[in-house]
Amino acid sequence: MLDRICLAPHAVARWAVDTPDVVALEHVDGRTHTYAELHTEGLRWAAGLAAVGVEAGAHVATMVPNDFDSHRVLLGLSWLRAVEVPMNSAFTGRILMYSLAHADCTVLVAAPEFVDRIAEVIEELPLVHTLVVLGEVDDAQRARLGSVRLIERDELLAAPALDPAPDGPEYHDVHSLMFTSGTTGPSKAVITPWPVMYQFWSWVPDDTVLPGEGVFCAMPMFHNSGRSAFNYAMVRGARFVIRERFSATDFWRDVRATGVTTAAVVGPMTALLYAAEPSPDDADNPLRNVVLGPMIPEMADFERRFGVRTCTCYGQTEVGIPLATGWDHGPWANCGKPRTDYPWLETRVVNELDEPLGPGEVGELIVRSPEPWALNLGYYKMPEQTVEAWRNGWFHTGDAFRVDDDGWYYFVDRLRDAIRRRGENISSFEVETAVTEHPDVLECAAVGVPATLGEDEVMVAVIVRDPDRFDPAELVAFLEERMPRFMVPRYVQVVADFPRTEASMRVRKHELRAQGVTTTTWDREASR
């Protein structure tokens, strides 16, 4: 059973008593909240939200940038035991309308910059009876919002304090509905109890963060990585340092200015930091730890260059973090080993019949836990998808893995991302790994595009160091010596950047597939 003190509002309340003047929340621009101030703000927002009708179990959508308000709203809703439905700040039009309608949201809390987008879809959302705008709304916007009840920030925060103070959440409460991203079908709203959010960061080594130390995280609060990092920092009595979005250009300046000892980044961020021109003072920084995933091939040099230690993991919205490493993280390509701490997740790599496979064999990773409420409770209003994912008492991740003789788990591919060419199944991950070993390639995404006679041809989209000097034919020649012929890409597309999910910067491969071969795509066959 997870202790209440491991849930953000209760953790903040604890430190508001024990260390009231310690900074809990800090923006890189210099603004701060102490634990006492943040606790007061959480209860203040709870009172305002209760005054507009939010109660336990209510589905409240939030569309707030990665700033203090996103944390205040989280705490306020948590004290009321409401279910938050975080909206990706990039949502607009049909996907915004679908998400709000599918999640049965009745109240929407939004920053002023999103009001025009909301006005475009509000008439299609009869369940939304109240819109809370964290600022002011002009007359033209009021007219477009129609009959929905509009509450501005000042009115919300003028509500009297709750008496008695709310009890706050229990570990078995549903914390949020988290929308999955990056799929070609309708997004799924994952029913997420508090333990899932907690264990997204509870795996990090015990000496990662001490009370009062700084944790830097530029990942958004509409994603579990950002929300769980905040929860972890509050549980540890640490200082959570944020900025609206990640900036490789500003990263080290932010680290030095705020004196953080731990930073959270994801794979593309790691690669961007490493790709920057080396400087003699790279290691002259306060950072001690980098929590990241996945690792990059140059991991050892990254650690030496910046004077840090790193750990990694494998996670998924539905299951949290079943695989993780310590500071001794093993080979760069691995994702870790099964956790041995709460919630004692069990993992297996299995075939299509859910039968366990041996070392080196590739199959689907499945997960379960003996602890109640430790994993997702299914997909909201999608019973068939829930049953399919949870068959045989295990949650099926949809990701292909293998395990080596030492017990390290290696991600092989998203099962839906596998490429089949001339009777051979090809791992897009393995293609991408080989391509990025070329010195001129910074990042790669491999997809299958339709072949003339059926199945797929391999196409790689690449971000390169110097597009004017890059030669696709030289890349293919490089690959022909390093991979089976059937894996060598036929098509090479140079891009400035990939379409990415805003939360995790994962490549939206379905968009690359839909784009397919264009007039600017290099074709190995046509060049011969």
Image: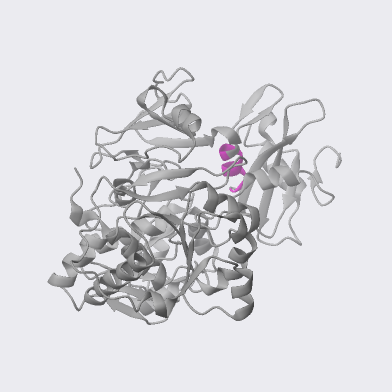
Q: Residue at x 80, y 47 (%)?
A: 522
Is 435 magenta? The answer is yes
Apparent side of residue 55 relative to residue 364 in the rendered image (left or right): left
Looking at the rendering, which quadrant does residue 301 occupy? bottom left
Q: Position of residue 209 (x, y in %)?
A: 25, 62
Looking at the rendering, which quadrant does residue 395 occupy? top left
* Magenta stretch, residue numbers: 429-436
Q: Is residue 72 above or below residue 481?
A: below
Q: Is residue 487 in view?
A: yes
Apparent side of residue 101 relative to residue 367 in the rendered image (left or right): right
Q: Nearer the viewer, residue 16 or 464?
A: 16
Apparent side of residue 361 relative to residue 166 in the rendered image (left or right): right
Residue located farthest toward the front when viewing the structure as drawn: 147
Q: Position of residue 153 (x, y in %)?
A: 43, 77
For the C terminus, give its image quadrant.
Answer: top right
Q: Nearer the viewer, residue 207 or 515?
A: 515
Apparent side of residue 147 relative to residue 165 in the rendered image (left or right): right
Q: Residue at x 23, y 73 (%)?
A: 35
Looking at the rendering, which quadrant does residue 183 occupy? top right
Q: Nearer the viewer, residue 264 or 98?
A: 98
Is 457 magenta? The answer is no
Dominant secondary structure (helix, strand or loop) of the stretch shown in magenta: helix
Q: Residue at x 41, y 80 (%)?
A: 154
Q: Is residue 495 above or below residue 388?
A: below
Q: Position of residue 343 (x, y in %)?
A: 25, 40
For the N terminus, give its image quadrant.
Answer: top left
Q: Is residue 460 in view?
A: no
Q: Position of residue 196 (x, y in %)?
A: 33, 46
Q: Residue at x 43, y 61 (%)?
A: 221
